[in-house]
Amino acid sequence: MVRKKEPPAKRFDLDGADVAVIGLGASGRAAARLALAKGGKVYVSDLHADAQTTDGGAELRALGADVEWGGHDIERVAGSDLVVVSPGIPTGAPVLRALTDRGLGWISEPELAVRYFSGQLIAVTGTNGKTTTSVLLQHLMASAGRSVSLGGNVGGGLAPAASDLVLDETPAEWWILELSSFQLGAIDTLRPDIGIVTNLSPDHLDYYDSVQAYYADKARLFLNADDHVGWVLPAGDDAVERLAGDAPGHRFYFCHEPDPGSQAFVRDSTLTLSVDGVEEALVRVDELPLLGRHNHVNALTAALAARLAGVDARELGVGLRSAEPLPHRMAPVADVDGVLWVNDSKATNVAATVSALQSLERPVVLLLGGKDKDEEYAPLRSALASVRAAVVYGAAGPRMARELDGVVPMIRVDGTFADAVDAGRAACEPGDILLLSPACSSFDMFSNYEERGRRFAELAESGP
């Protein structure tokens, strides 16, 4: 299935080319460093001029880039040979509207990076579970002795941007790139050897005009597909099947319960593969160091992709037993007076919280709230039916309390995050799980979900 790739084409040579990079976040800085290393004349701009942005710009200026804070020189951007746009900049932003009005396009940072990579590419996207699957896949391949690097939209300091991988002194034979919808929306030539879609549900509706627009960007993963690509997809997910459409390639499916059309599933409490028609037992679920039913599925997804990349079942079993939970993703952080505190701060959308609740068997007191992302909360209603109590807090608290009223005992907290955690602590009984799985972003109270998760862990340690 794995193709022999040709070296990157000469048309990607940036020597002496004018390159504009929009955005001074981690992805933009990585793209600028790569373009400079390839001989480009680089202009970088950002609307912001905060400390982090100015520090990043100063680093690039020292490397030879021309950096502008507080705005964009539209004419200079439009006159560039190549424009690279950081993820998260809306297509309706004035600088991008100006390019569109001129009939000009742009690419994302991972698209720039893969133009200089001639190894084998595994691309991972989806709404939830991307990072857990990506990191676990890298662990499975590395522990089996494969030459592999992880990058892309992983975040949390767990892996670099894709462009930084190009600059490694010893390039890996395999890349695993986690790709967000924002990054996929601006690809051109990117084509995976193995492509993974973990699942699909509405998200980022505070950024996209519609869920269809969000799905359309995800669908670009299949843009350059050919018959050699191996697709790893969730069984029975109609939304993902519509996303893939009639894209060429070989399809392999994962699910939790055994299914005749699936190649990865749980049988008799054991993670199992059946890629060549012969079932291979990998590891019992009680040996997997990851909490929750949905992490069984993430492990199956990663194991199936690694199997397609040539890792055998014995090696996969060893790797799965030595896996470690990721921070802020169903990570146990403390056991206090018989109550298990679980940090799932990365659950920034409704589907992630539903998945977390469905994966647990102990009684749960749920911390729910944050910044509203304009999602429907109705899918939470059935998942909340088994919850002992829900503490709603933050900017989304009033709407959540209103729309979820009557489903579960509701504790409304109008104060700080610590106040909400204290209310959750008080509602717990021995044997319960106090679960931070907010279904919202963190930006009403925190700079990111990592900071929110760290604060939750600190409150567990400090006591009431």
Image (spheres, rainbow, N blue to C red):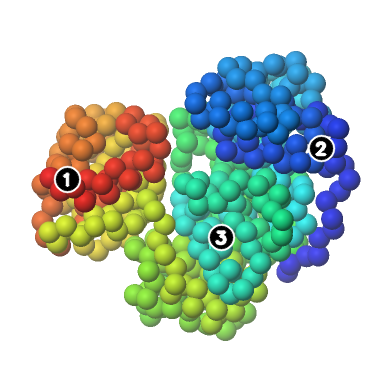
Q: Which element is circle 1 on?
A: helix
Identify the residue position indicated by label 2 in the image. 39
Q: Which element is circle 2 on?
A: loop
Which residue is rendered at x = 71% and y = 49% of the image?
A: 167
Q: Is residue 281 above or below residue 16?
A: below
Q: Mark 2 or 3, which is nearer the eye?
A: 2
* Label 1 neighbour load within 10 Å: few <14, some 14-19, many 20+: many
Identify the residue position indicated by label 1 in the image. 424
Q: Is residue 459 above or below residue 19?
A: below
Q: CA distance from mark 2 to mark 3?
A: 39 Å
Q: CA distance from mark 2 to mark 1?
A: 56 Å
Check if mark 1's residue and mark 3's residue have beta carbons within 8 Å. no
Is there any visible trace of residue 405 in the rendered image?
A: no
Which of the pair 216/292 is nearer the observer?
A: 292
**Type of amino acid at the residue the image marks with label 2:** Gly
Q: Position of residue 73 (x, y in %)?
A: 69, 16
Identify the residue position indicated by label 3 in the image. 233
Is there any visible trace of residue 197 in the rendered image?
A: yes
